[in-house]
Image (cartoon, rainbow, N blue to C red):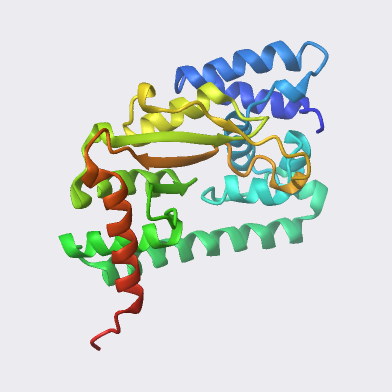
């Protein structure tokens, strides 16, 4: 892994000095310690802070290649992190890559933003109001795709916080489990800030820290470098514990499997 440049360090400092939350501020304190003391980057810049720094650099008009080089991550990672940022190349970028190319990239960025807005408007029109049945079927579809295919355990696995939060709501409101039946185990990576990951998922799901199992750290050494940093908060494994109630244990797992089978096998009535 490379070292962060002075430009990246300044961008990180701008992000963290805003005091958005204690986690980011703590991350910056860590960065100060290790970036300025022999550049011990391996345990320095956390992924959440790198992402915020990438956003700051993109807003400042820097190219994907430049940001990737400054933060020692791949261009594809930078693209994902800054997908919602409107890109207007700065003077330095124009001089480095050429005015014509910079202008072309800026136009494409504007076109992308307009396309995203148009897609959102059209999606709202297509979606309309969701009924309770709509929500039930949406949750069932997500469980068919990302739920554990087992007749003895109820578990949903995903890295997207909105999806995980929706499924927790679905388990409670549509399936009928109680809040205290919901438990989470995080699947993390060696470069993940464990405390920051827990803080993130607690905020996103509303599940208290006492209902988080000890995380699993994926220590595989054969993971491709380009995949690093893609899941800065890891993956949430949401499990429904029966807590002594049979209807929330094996029976619920079997019921969800039955619902899944029926939904997939049932022909439409169009």
Q: Residue at x 52, y 21 (%)?
A: 195
Residue 11's spot in the image, x, y percent?
Answer: 64, 28
Residue closer to the observer: 129 or 247: 247
Farthest residue, direction left: 132
Residue 92 visible in this rendered orientation of the protein: no
Q: Quadrant of residue 248?
A: top left
Residue drawn at point x = 67 percent, y = 23 percent? 10
The structure residue drawn at horizontal position 38% and vertical position 55%, both measured from the top left corner, is: 151
Q: Seen in the image, is 153 located left or right of residue 126? A: right
Q: Is residue 118 above or below residue 229?
A: below
* 121 up-or-down from 268: above or below: above
Quadrant in the rendering for residue 237: top left
| Image coords of residue 99 (percent x, y) | 75, 56
Residue in the foreground of this view, choosing between 250 and 7: 250
10 or 38, which lies in front? 38
Q: Position of residue 147 (x, y in %)?
A: 42, 54
């Amino acid at each position: 892994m490379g070292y962060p440049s002075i430009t990246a360090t300044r961008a990180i400092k701008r992000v963290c000095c805003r005091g958005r939350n204690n986690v980011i501020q703590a991350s910056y304190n860590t960065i100060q310690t290790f970036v300025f003391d022999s550049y011990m980057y391996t345990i320095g810049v956390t992924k959440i802070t790198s992402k915020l720094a990438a956003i700051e650099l993109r807003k400042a008009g820097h190219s994907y290649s430049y940001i990737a080089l400054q933060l020692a991550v791949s261009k594809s990672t930078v693209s994902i992190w800054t997908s919602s940022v409107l890109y207007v190349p700065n003077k330095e970028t124009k001089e480095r890559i050429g005015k014509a190319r910079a202008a072309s990239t800026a136009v494409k960025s504007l076109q992308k933003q307009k396309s995203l807005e148009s897609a959102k408007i059209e999606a709202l029109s297509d979606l309309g109001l969701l009924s309770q049945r709509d929500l039930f079927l949406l949750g069932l579809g997500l469980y068919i795709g990302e739920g554990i295919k087992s007749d003895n355990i109820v578990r949903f696995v995903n890295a997207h916080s909105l999806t995980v939060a929706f499924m927790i709501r679905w388990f409670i409101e549509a399936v009928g489990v109680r809040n205290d039946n919901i438990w989470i185990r995080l699947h993390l990576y060696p470069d993940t800030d464990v405390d920051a990951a827990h803080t993130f998922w607690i905020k996103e799901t509303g599940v208290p820290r006492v209902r988080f199992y000890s995380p699993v750290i994926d220590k595989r050494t054969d993971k491709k470098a380009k995949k690093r940093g893609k899941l800065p908060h890891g993956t949430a494994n949401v499990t429904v514990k029966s807590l002594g109630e049979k209807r929330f244990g094996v029976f619920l797992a079997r019921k969800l499997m039955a619902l899944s089978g029926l939904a997939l096998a049932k022909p439409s009535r169009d």
